[in-house]
């Protein structure tokens, strides 16, 4: 038995934001990030539409990137005082992720992060409020997923929350909001979305419900990401949908070791963070080569390659064609080939080698490793990380 869960309603296309006028409720708290939604006038529009629906509005502003435990508890406190029956989260992944966690603490003030960290073990939500998510970036797809990541900066740990209870009730996927993304963010979030779809397609938990979403998302991203990066707004609008389809696939099929590695290398080094989407983009070609040693996975990568029009006579040729195509997309998006080249070399070689064993161990233990099509040992993970640092050929 498997479960497949999505938001009940998804409004998409230009102007979809206006659908907020039709929400039925009394009080809404609007959770938002650092200011771009305000600057571009979207926050004013959200407030105006909700008021038109007869809903009283309160704002929770200033959710930081990689939202903290403190922000979540502050938001939950505001919710307990205001008692909203709608939580409306708008922005990049962070405000939406933060609002999902606030929701749990609003409904269950005595719950702890440790409780919520146990996968698929949330208490039932929606006793006090429903949840509407409105994404402004085209990548994380948190508007349709069962996931949220909250950081405890004091303990230096990330809490990955996973439960279908936090899959939003309503998602509004309006391409107007994504028009404001800067170029590099477009590249990184777009490759994050491609990785979601590829990992979902080859995941051990993939199924007939997730496969078509993943494949179609891959085709769209392959067609539109480079154009969107160069400012084609129609392509950018299609990317907003494509990343959402990829989200529907991976929320239900889960991911693989590209994400395990991106999670555990992301904040491991003193030179700086490796941005999530960029890490995925660099690691994906290496992981495909590693996973393709399992013939079932190779067949599925070959299916992806054929589906996007690549050529080859055997699965092996098609897998290589797919790897070459992803590397070429990275090049067109100015994404480096390996960690050593990242941001002009900010990740120090000696530090990378010092931490290799511990990062490999953590990556093997990441929640995304379980659904990867090829099992991996810590020793293999070390070798794979080395290939990702130096852009070496994966041959094991
Ligand atoms: Fe991701």
Image: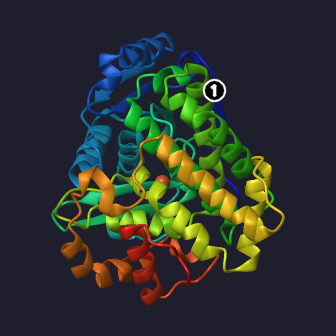
Q: Is residue 235 above or below residue 76?
A: above
User: What's the residue at 30%, 50% (across, down)?
Assistant: 66
Whether residue 371 can be seen here: no
* Of the pair 322 and 109, the residue shown nearer to us: 322
Q: Determine which quarter of the picture holds residue 46.
A: top left
Q: Secondary structure at mark 1?
A: strand
Q: Is residue 30 above or below residue 199?
A: above
Colour option used: rainbow
Q: Which residue is mark 1?
A: 12
User: What's the residue at 73%, 44% (across, down)?
Assistant: 216
User: What's the residue at 82%, 68% (across, down)?
Assistant: 314
Q: Determine which quarter of the picture holds residue 303.
A: bottom right
Label 1 crowd (10 A; few <14 / some 14-19 / many >=20): some
**Percent position of residue 332, x then y:** 50, 41
**Percent position of residue 369, x then y:** 52, 75
Whether residue 153 can be seen here: yes
* Of the pair 300 and 338, the residue shown nearer to us: 338
Residue at the right extreme of this rendering: 313
Badge count: 1
User: What's the residue at 49%, 31% (across, down)?
Assistant: 229
* Of the pair 348 and 149, the residue shown nearer to us: 348
Image quarter (top left, top right, bottom left or bottom right) of the N terminus: bottom right
Image quarter (top left, top right, bottom left or bottom right) of the C terminus: bottom right
Mark 1 close to ligand 1, CB under 8 Å = no
Q: Is residue 270 left or right of residue 164?
A: left
**Percent position of residue 133, x then y:** 49, 36
Q: Is residue 122 above or below residue 230?
A: below
**Percent position of residue 187, x then y:** 46, 40
């Amino acid at each position: 038995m498997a479960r497949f869960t999505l938001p009940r309603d998804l409004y998409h296309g230009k102007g979809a934001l206006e659908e907020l006028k039709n929400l039925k409720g009394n009080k809404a708290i609007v959770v938002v990030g650092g200011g771009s939604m305000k600057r571009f006038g979207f926050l004013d529009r959200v407030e105006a539409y909700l008021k038109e629906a007869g809903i009283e509005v309160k704002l929770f502003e200033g959710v930081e990137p990689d939202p903290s435990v403190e922000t979540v508890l502050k938001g939950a406190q505001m919710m307990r005082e205001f008692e909203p029956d709608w939580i409306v989260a708008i922005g990049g992944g962070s405000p939406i992720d933060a609002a999902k966690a606030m929701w749990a603490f609003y409904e269950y003030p005595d719950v702890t992060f440790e409780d919520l960290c146990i996968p698929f073990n949330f208490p039932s939500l929606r006793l006090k409020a429903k949840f509407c998510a409105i994404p402004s970036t085209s990548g994380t797809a948190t508007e349709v997923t069962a996931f949220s990541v909250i950081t405890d900066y004091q303990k230096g740990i990330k809490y990955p929350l996973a439960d279908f209870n936090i899959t939003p009730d309503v998602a509004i996927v309006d391409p107007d909001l994504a028009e404001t993304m800067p170029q590099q963010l477009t590249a990184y979030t777009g490759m994050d979305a491609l990785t979601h779809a590829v990992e979902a397609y080859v995941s051990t938990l993939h199924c007939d419900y997730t496969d078509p979403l993943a494949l179609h998302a891959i085709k769209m991203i392959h067609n539109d990401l480079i154009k969107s990066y160069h400012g084609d707004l129609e392509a950018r609008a299609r990317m907003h949908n494509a990343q959402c389809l990829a989200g529907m696939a991976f929320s239900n099929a889960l991911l693989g070791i590209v994400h395990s590695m991106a999670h555990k290398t992301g904040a491991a080094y003193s030179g700086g963070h490796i941005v999530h989407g960029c890490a995925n983009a660099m690691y994906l070609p290496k992981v495909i080569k590693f996973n393709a040693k399992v013939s079932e996975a190779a067949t599925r990568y070959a299916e992806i390659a054929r589906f996007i029009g690549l050529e080859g006579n055997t699965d092996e040729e098609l897998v290589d064609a797919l790897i070459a195509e992803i590397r070429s997309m990275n090049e067109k998006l100015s994404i480096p080939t390996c960690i050593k080249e990242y941001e002009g070399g900010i990740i120090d070689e000696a530090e990378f080698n010092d931490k290799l064993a511990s990062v490999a161990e953590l990556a093997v233990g990441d929640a995304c490793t379980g659904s990867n099509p090829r099992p991996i040992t810590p020793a293999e993970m070390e070798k794979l990380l080395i290939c990702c640092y130096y852009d070496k050929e994966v041959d094991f």
